[in-house]
């Protein structure tokens, strides 16, 4: 079905059908519910702090219908303008209202290759939900929770029964996707739907990139990610694991020797930043990348059943205020730490983490030390014994728009601890220069135009390796946009 059909029409499909929903003759206008936003069922904080099971439990059918009933079904849905991948939000929610779940899945998957992932980890509150008309005077429709509900309904069926888009006729063109993170997966799915043969090259032994190694099981179960990847394989995408492009081969060889017509690079920017303060070489100091990878991806929480050990601290300091810092802190709680403290140089109001993640962390016992800037890590016999901080006060806004932290002279304090996890961001890995010789930015990221095209018209890129660290859904949006540009390039070449 073309995107040109009337958006006022709701559709219906049989489950397992591959086509998008056909428009119905008409859609009766309705009076929405005036109830407030419906809370998401969750594990009890005292219980979940001791397990890696998913924290949020998902809407029941009754809750999902009640929340969908709050949607105004706007003629010009402003919420969709806030979605980086352009999901037909009004339509998938409208199909819930008519009890047509197959149609809801079809509308959702028409634009989103990873709905079960996005429904869990996307910051909807600052994207689609922030544009909801109801948010102007109250609470937005819980679009993310409804997206998760619909995607999980689809997942409750066998792989063969799930909705899958019908790809266009085979084009005879081949595209290599380097990296299987959110940008790569979105690009691969979009290109496969457009009829191209897509092969994904992943350096690790499983797919998902940061979705696999960087997001804890309690926020994104690995089985859900595996299901999403299986859906792409069903669409025809081929995955090659344990194949680090840049070591075994490179982009030039893929194009000139392996017969690929175009390449998309979505390798992320996973090289951790450190504070560059004394003591960072002590035992007990981790980057958040290493800590989360060991626990969430290499099963260190189950040592010695799995053979990847990790230092289990008792007094843990996590430096940072973003989502990764929250993930590290909440993981440390589950690893048995007696006390976990977030150390942040601004206040909670300036933290870039999702409010929901900070709320969950505090429910689970994580403490917050505001207006504290680390200046040294102290140790004894090679092991961490404390974090030395300097107290801050907020000055004028900086380039980020947030008030700049200013050190208070003579306010130094040592906080006793045995573990410090540094979660202050990442940057591009130098590996990118081994993959391709296209132009880089001054900061080492791939330089592209607005469509993801690099200095070589056959090579495209998107996600964190272009923008620096950002969200999953923004990376997916970049992957989809680059896929459209690649499709146009292939049609003209």
Image (cartoon, grey):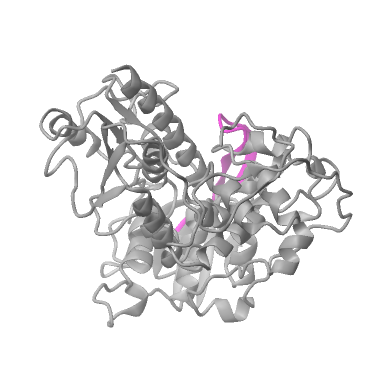
Residue 39, position as x, y percentages in the image: 74, 64
Quadrant of residue 186 within the rendered picture: top left
Residue 8, position as x, y percentages in the image: 74, 37
In this view, the residue in front, 320 or 116, is 116
- Residue at 44% across / 41% down in the picture? 469
Number of labels in the image equals 0
Q: Quadrant of the N terminus?
A: top right
- Residue 439 seen in the figure: yes
Residue 326, position as x, y percentages in the image: 52, 59
In this view, the residue in front, 415 or 50, is 50
In this view, the residue in front, 310 or 491, is 491
Q: Which residues are magenta?
A: 388-411
In this view, the residue in front, 340 or 226, is 226
- Asked if residue 321 is positioned above or below residue 480 in the image, the reply reads below
Q: Is residue 300 left or right of residue 157?
A: left
Q: Is residue 215 left or right of residue 149?
A: left
Question: Is residue 478 shown in magenta?
Answer: no
Look at the magenta stretch and give its main secondary structure. Answer: strand
- Asked if residue 259 is positioned above or below residue 270 in the image, the reply reads above
For the view shown, which residue lies furthest in the top direction? 492
- Residue at 45% across / 22% down in the picture? 450
Residue 427, position as x, y percentages in the image: 36, 40
Question: Is residue 396 shown in magenta?
Answer: yes
């Amino acid at each position: 079905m073309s995107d040109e059909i009337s958006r006022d029409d709701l559709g219906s499909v049989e489950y397992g059908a591959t086509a998008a929903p056909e428009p119905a003759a008409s859609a009766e206008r309705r009076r929405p519910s005036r109830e407030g936003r419906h809370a998401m069922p969750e594990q009890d904080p005292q219980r979940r702090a001791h397990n890696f099971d998913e924290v949020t439990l998902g809407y029941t059918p009754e809750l999902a219908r009640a929340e969908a009933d709050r949607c105004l079904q706007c003629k010009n849905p402003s919420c969709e303008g806030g979605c980086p991948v352009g999901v037909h939000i009004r339509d998938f929610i409208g199909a819930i209202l008519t009890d047509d779940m197959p149609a809801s899945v079809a509308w959702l998957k028409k634009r989103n290759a990873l709905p079960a992932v996005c429904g869990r980890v996307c910051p909807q509150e600052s994207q689609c939900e922030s544009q909801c008309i109801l948010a102007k005077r109250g609470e937005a429709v819980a679009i993310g929770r409804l997206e998760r509900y619909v995607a999980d309904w689809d997942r409750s069926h066998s792989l063969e029964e799930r909705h899958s888009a019908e790809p266009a006729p085979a084009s005879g063109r081949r595209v290599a996707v380097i990296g299987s993170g959110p940008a790569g997966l979105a690009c691969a799915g979009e290109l496969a739907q457009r009829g191209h043969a897509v092969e994904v090259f992943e350096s690790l032994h499983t797919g998902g990139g940061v979705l696999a190694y960087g997001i804890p099981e309690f926020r994104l179960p690995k089985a859900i990610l595996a299901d999403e990847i299986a859906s792409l394989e069903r669409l025809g995408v081929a995955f090659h694991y344990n194949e680090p492009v840049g070591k075994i081969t490179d982009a030039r060889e893929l194009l000139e020797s392996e017969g690929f017509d175009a390449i998309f690079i979505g390798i992320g920017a996973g090289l951790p930043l450190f504070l560059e303060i004394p003591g960072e070489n002590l035992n007990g100091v981790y980057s958040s990348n290493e800590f989360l990878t060991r626990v969430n991806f290499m099963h260190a929480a189950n040592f010695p059943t799995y053979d990847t050990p990790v230092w289990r601290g008792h007094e843990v300091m996590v430096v940072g205020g973003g989502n990764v810092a929250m993930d590290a802190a909440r993981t440390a709680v589950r690893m048995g730490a007696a006390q976990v403290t977030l150390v942040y140089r601004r206040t909670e109001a300036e933290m870039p983490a999702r409010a929901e993640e900070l709320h969950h962390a505090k429910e689970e016992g994580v403490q917050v030390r505001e207006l504290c800037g680390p200046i040294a890590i102290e140790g004894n016999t090679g092991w961490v014994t404390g974090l030395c901080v300097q107290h801050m006060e907020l000055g004028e806004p900086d380039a980020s728009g947030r008030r700049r932290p200013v050190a208070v002279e003579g306010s130094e304090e040592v906080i006793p601890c045995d573990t410090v996890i540094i979660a202050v961001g990442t940057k591009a890995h130098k590996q990118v220069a081994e993959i391709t010789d296209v132009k880089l930015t001054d900061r080492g990221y791939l330089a592209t135009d607005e469509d993801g095209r690099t200095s070589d018209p056959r090579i495209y890129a998107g996600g964190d390796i272009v923008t620096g660290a950002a969200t999953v859904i923004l990376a997916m949006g970049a992957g989809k946009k680059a896929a459209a540009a690649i499709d146009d390039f292939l049609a003209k070449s």
